[in-house]
Amino acid sequence: MFFGRLATQGKIKPAQVNDMLINKEDFILIDVRTQGEYVSGHIKGSQLLPLDMITNGIEKMVPDKNKKIVVYCQSGARSSQAARILSQLSYTDVSNLGGIMSWPFGVVGGR
């Protein structure tokens, strides 16, 4: 019998994430793209954890399995995969922002 929190995984809108950032809500925003993509422009306040490093790197970055996590990538495919992996690793509050291509609030970094 399962007594813990059920894992949730769903889409979240850019405006919701922007409000969460502005209000300094307690969550972690993870960019699952490559280092090069991250350097070329990312959402302010995000942390880089490339998709191919999620399984081995997430517990060091986010030891609390109940912490709210929002993931994004370039177009939404890798972030969908990352959200599934995080749920399989027992993270209970995972949301998929989708792709940075649909983020209308500006990015930092770039060349």
Image (spheres, rainbow, N blue to C red):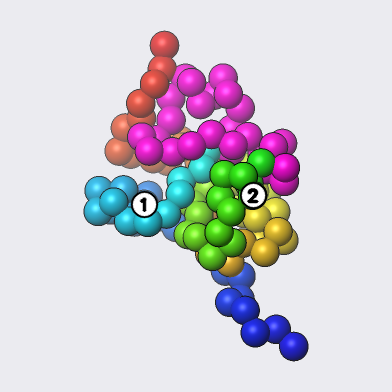
Say what amino acid the circle numbered 2 marks: Glu
- Mark 1 residue element: helix
Please rate how many residues cluster around mark 1, counting C-alpha atoms within 10 Å: few if below 14, some from 14 to 19, many from 20.
some
The answer to if 3 sits in the magenta stretch is no
Seen at 25% across and 53% down, the residue is 23
Q: Which residue is mark 1?
A: 17
Identify which residue is drawn at 46% across, 49% down: 28
Would residue 67 appear left or right of 85 to someone viewing this image? left
Magenta part of the chain: 32-56
Q: Is residue 34 above or below residue 24?
A: above
Q: Looking at the figure, which quarter contains the N terminus?
A: bottom right
Q: Residue furthest bottom?
A: 1
Label 2 crowd (10 A; few <14 / some 14-19 / many >=20)? some
Name the residue that disc number 2 marks: 59
Measured as percent of width and height from the top left, residue 82 is found at 64, 48
Q: Residue at x 53, y 34 (%)?
A: 48
* Location of residue 84 in the rendering, given as x and y in whole percent from the top left corner: 67, 57
Q: On the picture, is 85 further left or further right than 13?
A: right
